[in-house]
Amino acid sequence: MLILGILSIVLLTITDTDAQRRTRERERDRRDDTENISKIYHTIHMGNINFFNGNFSLSGKYAAGYKLHDRFSAGLTGKFFFDIIGQPGDDINLFSYGAGTFVRARITNDIYLQGEYDLTNYDEINTSRDIHSYPLVGAGYEQGQGPWKFGANAMIILDQDVRDLFAVGNRVVEWWITFSYNF
């Protein structure tokens, strides 16, 4: 009977130790998941707004990034450009869209530099759609409290062929107002 009692105590102790180990592993996994989620950020951009001389332009861009380091991140973007060009007779409606990749380096907590490479399908007047890949470089400023921040950035279009497109309108810079979560 004594052996059965000792064996029961040993078995209960081993089971309890194993349960504590599994609980610690689950807590560590949850912490790791939380740390990985906190490295992802999202940004909504609205920009290139124009409503003068019978014309209307509006652009939007969504970016999702991953913080590689406290100061460096990389991610993907999707964007669109919508233009209505007023002219005698019928107005011209253009819708262009694209996607890209970016890298971002924080200079301070509020100021950053960004490089981007986009592949955009431009809607052109009297021609078929034109697909262009091109680099952009720029800088931005974001401020705010907590996880939500707002700001602005400007991206310089480095490809002269893209700047010459009618849909781009000889625009050298893409201007964006930004709303970011967790940047």
Image: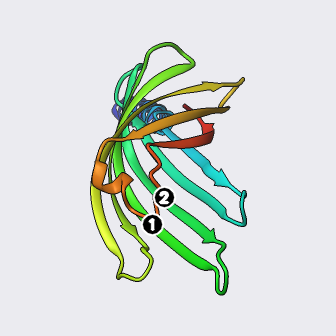
The residue that label 2 is drawn on is 79
Residue 142 versus residue 27: which sits nearer the camera? 142
Quadrant holding the N terminus:
top left
Circle 1 crowding by C-alpha within 10 Å: few under 14, some 14–19, many from 20: some
Q: Residue furthest top?
A: 108
Quadrant in the picture for residue 132 = bottom left
Q: Give the side of residue 20 with respect to residue 69, left or right.
A: right
Q: Secondary structure at mark 1?
A: strand
- Percent across and percent down for residue 80 are 51, 63
Whether residue 82 is visible to the viewer of this picture, yes or no, is: yes
Q: Residue at x 29, y 55 (%)?
A: 161
Q: Residue at x 31, y 42 (%)?
A: 158
Is disc 2 in contact with disc 1, using a CB cutoff of under 8 Å? yes
Residue 163 versus residue 78: which sits nearer the camera? 163
The residue that label 1 is drawn on is 97
Q: In this rendering, is residue 10 above or below 158?
A: above
Compare marks 2 and 1 and give the one earlier in the sequence: 2
Q: Residue furthest bottom?
A: 89
Whether residue 26 is visible to the viewer of this picture, yes or no, is: no
Q: Give the side of residue 45 with respect to residue 117, left or right.
A: right
Q: In this rendering, is residue 72 above or below 78?
A: above
Quadrant in the picture for residue 72 = top left
Q: Secondary structure at mark 2?
A: strand
Q: Residue at x 42, y 33 (%)?
A: 32
Q: Which mark is residue 136?
A: none
Kind of residue at disc 1: Tyr
Q: Residue at x 53, y 53 (%)?
A: 61
The residues bearing labels 2 and 1 have C-alpha atoms spaced at a distance of 6 Å
Kind of residue at disc 2: Lys
- Percent across and percent down for residue 4 are 37, 37
